[in-house]
Image (spheres, rainbow, N blue to C red):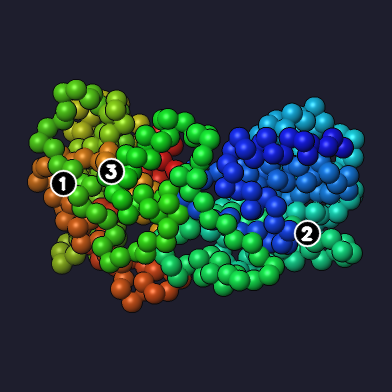
């Protein structure tokens, strides 16, 4: 294979001299944690490609918890490193399946989702052996058992005096009791583990764009705690109150200098005792989000409760009123995928199809919302209809008894508009420019 060792110093100097200690360590396991934009993935991918090119029989396995994220993350990251080293002509870049193979040796980079860790237990390769594993976004994995099952699959072969190098990279969750934070802390002082923490502030060569730095500085100005976690990689804790209400900015009317581009809606549908709520959210030219209107119906305490057909008709009336008042296209109409009754009734009665979204982990959904809030981009019209939205978010709290556990929970009382807001943000996070 090509020998790129003469490029190593130049490549590292270009990216970050802070990573020399990582590059030169010879321990079998390396854990790289830190804030976003801290170049962990860039340095790991370069290290993997250079080591691969110096071993004719070595293969590398790159892993994400969710398989659908492979193509846009670790696959492109390894491809980037290959191009950075100028050896792209030596490889075949396969997309189905995701494999990057070396033309001469037949060894390569393999990419796998770990949606079900047991499915990887029987995996074999025809040429060579596994020289390295990379667990990207380690915090996504379910726990130590999740990674142990996978790791054992690939290190079981006896390689004599060689070790299979294992790399873990992740952004620390806010919760100090999350499994990955506790697991990393347990490796401090271990002879088999190298720990490295970095942030965007370690970018000594101005690798990050001016636009990215401005975005990060905006986070710091709006919410320093969030900035410390997101870009400093610090474990800041959860706290009782979930949202900083200073980020919910009131408006008396729509701004004259920032026109509305489109409107999205989101729905949390209730049952016998739970409320049904809809929200209409405007997206402006400057990427601000404005809550225009809230529909809220609670059956609690009512002897005669509204039937699904009534809720269907009222949704249609509410949506028509929003369209008429703001004269803008309604783009996405989001609803929890587990809620079929209102969806089916609306389609039967009015031919309206709501867009079902699969709920993620509650804390992930909250983090998507926090990402929007911390950028200072969320506003609401100060109307009587929207007061219930503000009141529920003001009361939205973590369950205090669960905070010192690996799985903190929210208090699920009067949280219907909170769920509705999370559905909106989660379903529209790409066009809102939020993290994935």
Identify the residue shown where x is 82% and y is 66%.
156
In 3D space, how far apart are the residues under numbered discs 2 and 1 (Cα atoms)?
A: 56 Å
Q: Circle 1 sits on which residue?
A: 386
Q: Circle 3 sits on which residue?
A: 221
* Lateral position of residue 158 relative to residue 250, left or right: right
Tell me if mark 3 has few (under 14), some (14-19) or many (20+) residues whose alpha carbon lies within 10 angstroms of its own: few
Which numbered dot is residue 60?
none
Identify the residue shown where x is 50% and y is 34%.
206
In 3D space, how far apart are the residues under numbered discs 3 and 2 (Cα atoms)?
A: 44 Å
Q: Nearer the viewer, mark 3 or mark 2?
A: 3
Residue 120 on image: x %, y %: 74, 58
| CB atoms of marks 2 and 1 within 8 Å | no
In the displayed structure, 263 sits above or below 47; it is: above
Residue 95 on image: x %, y %: 71, 35
Tell me if mark 1 has few (under 14), some (14-19) or many (20+) residues whose alpha carbon lies within 10 angstroms of its own: some
Identify the residue shown where x is 37% and y is 64%.
237
Residue 160 on image: x %, y %: 89, 64
Going from the N terminus, do you reach mark 3 or mark 1 first? 3
Tell me if mark 2 has few (under 14), some (14-19) or many (20+) residues whose alpha carbon lies within 10 angstroms of its own: many
Q: How many marks?
A: 3
Q: Nearer the viewer, mark 2 or mark 1?
A: 2
Find numbered disc 1 in the image and state the secondary structure of the residue it sits on: loop
Find numbered disc 3 in the image and state the secondary structure of the residue it sits on: helix
Work out whether residue 295 can be spotted. Answer: no
Q: Nearer the viewer, mark 3 or mark 1?
A: 3
* Viewer-side residue, 326 vs 98: 98
* Viewer-side residue, 124 vs 272: 124
Residue 135 on image: x %, y %: 64, 55
Identify the residue shown where x is 16% and y is 56%.
391
Which numbered dot is residue 164?
2
In 3D space, how far apart are the residues under numbered discs 3 and 1 (Cα atoms)?
A: 27 Å
């Amino acid at each position: 294979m090509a020998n790129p060792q003469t490029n190593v110093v130049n490549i590292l100097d270009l990216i970050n001299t802070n990573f020399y200690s990582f590059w030169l360590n010879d321990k079998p396991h390396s854990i790289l944690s830190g804030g976003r934009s801290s170049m962990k993935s860039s340095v790991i991918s370069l290290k993997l490609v250079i080591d691969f090119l110096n071993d004719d029989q070595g293969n590398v396995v790159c892993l994400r918890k969710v398989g659908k994220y492979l193509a846009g993350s670790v696959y492109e990251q390894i491809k980037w490193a290959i191009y950075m080293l100028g050896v792209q002509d030596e490889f075949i870049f396969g997309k189905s399946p995701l494999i990057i193979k070396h033309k001469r040796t037949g060894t390569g980079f393999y990419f796998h989702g770990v949606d079900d860790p047991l499915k990887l237990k029987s995996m074999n390769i025809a040429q060579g052996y596994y020289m390295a594993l990379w667990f990207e976004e380690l915090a996504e994995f379910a726990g130590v058992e999740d990674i142990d099952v996978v790791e054992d699959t690939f290190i079981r072969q006896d390689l004599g005096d060689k070790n299979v190098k294992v790399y873990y990279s992740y952004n620390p969750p806010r919760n100090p009791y999350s499994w990955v934070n506790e697991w990393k802390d347990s490796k401090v002082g271990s002879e088999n583990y190298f720990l490295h923490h970095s942030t965007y502030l370690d970018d000594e060569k101005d690798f990050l764009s001016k636009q990215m730095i401005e975005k990060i500085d905006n986070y710091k100005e709006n919410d320093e705690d969030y900035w410390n976690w997101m870009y400093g990689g610090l474990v800041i804790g959860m706290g009782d109150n979930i949202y900083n209400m200073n980020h919910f900015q009131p408006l008396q009317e729509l701004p004259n200098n920032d026109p509305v581009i489109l409107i999205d809606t989101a729905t949390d549908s209730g049952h016998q005792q739970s409320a049904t709520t809809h929200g209409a959210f405007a997206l402006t030219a400057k990427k601000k989000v404005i809550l225009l209107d809230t529909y809220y119906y609670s059956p609690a305490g009512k002897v005669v409760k509204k039937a699904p057909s009534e809720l269907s008709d009222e949704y249609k009336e509410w949506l028509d009123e929003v369209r008429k008042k703001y004269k803008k296209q309604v783009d996405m109409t989001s609803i929890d995928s587990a809620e079929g009754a209102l969806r089916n009734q609306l389609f039967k009665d009015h031919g309206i199809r709501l867009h079902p979204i699969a709920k993620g982990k509650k804390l992930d959904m909250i983090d998507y919302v926090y990402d929007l809030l911390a950028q200072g981009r969320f506003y609401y019209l100060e109307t009587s209809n929207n007061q219930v939205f503000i009141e529920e978010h003001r009361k939205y709290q973590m369950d205090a008894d669960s905070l010192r556990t690996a799985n903190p929970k929210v208090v699920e009382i009067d949280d219907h508009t909170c769920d509705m807001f999370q559905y909106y943000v989660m379903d529209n996070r790409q066009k809102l420019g939020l993290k994935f």
